[in-house]
Amino acid sequence: MTAAERRFRDRADAGRALAALLSHHADRADVVVLGLPRGGVPVAVEVARALGAPLDVYVVRKLGLPSQPELAMGAVASGGTRVLNEELVTSLALSPALIEEVAARELLVLEARERAYRGDRPPVDVEGRVVVLVDDGLATGASMRAAVAALRARGPASITVAVPVAPEETCAALSRVADELIVVATPYPFVAVGLWYVDFSEVSDQEVGELLAQAWSPTGSSLAEPPS
């Protein structure tokens, strides 16, 4: 798809377009699809269905500096994984107490979201598996880079970042941290993710939970299994 051809109708349409580029991962026992909430989950549902792969949600919270929230000194993610930008921590002489304070606050938010999304189900085990990490689009890619770093700490065999739309400069940065990058469209000028969707309605926590419950239900998609 080029910018001149069309926009995605909605996130499900984007997921199907993305899945078409991921066919080399279809019907493999070692593949798992992880959706970044909230908007990445409806996209990931379609990808998991097309690939015949288990689906889970991967929640990431950046650890922003109190004085500069957009500047991430690290991240916490599903399963309690924490990663730090050691170079930044060292250069700014950030104290362990400050890091713990920010991490504890963000972990509380993460745990609340996880309970809302998956209830008591544990995160899927990604160790030794091919992980397809899905979002509905990227702008700066900061959250996705944090997700890749946190996920890497859990020992997957490889990480594929898969998104419907992103600017070329963000793709270039992510290609250096992911094992594989799959993007349907890299329009220019990019402006914003929502511009490339006809329907870019906000996805609620409740909707994310319902989508996952349907995927994990015995009467739902047989291609999206509950986390082990």
Image (tube, grey):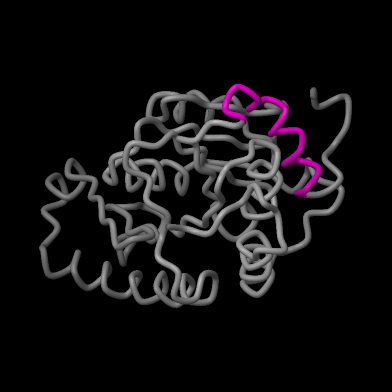
Q: Which quadrant would the C terminus be assigned to in this image?
A: bottom left
Horizontal side of 73 relative to 223 (left or right) equals left
Q: How many marks can you see?
A: 0
- In the depicted view, which residue is nearer to us: 194 or 177? 177
**Which quadrant of the view contains residue 65?**
bottom left
Please state the horizontal and vertical placement of residue 49, each as a whole percent of the image: 69, 44
Q: Residue at x 69, y 33 (%)?
A: 19
**Horizontal arrangement in the rendering, residue 204 relative to residue 161 (left or right):** right
- Image quadrant in which you'd find residue 81: bottom left
| In the depicted structure, whether residue 104 falls above or below residue 45 | below
Q: Position of residue 9 (x, y in %)?
A: 86, 45
Q: Which residues are magenta?
A: 11-26
* Magenta region includes residue 13: yes
Point out the image quarter for the N terminus: top right
Please state the horizontal and vertical placement of residue 119, each as a whole percent of the image: 49, 76
Q: Is residue 50 above or below residue 75?
A: above
**Percent from the top left, x then y, of residue 174?**
46, 30
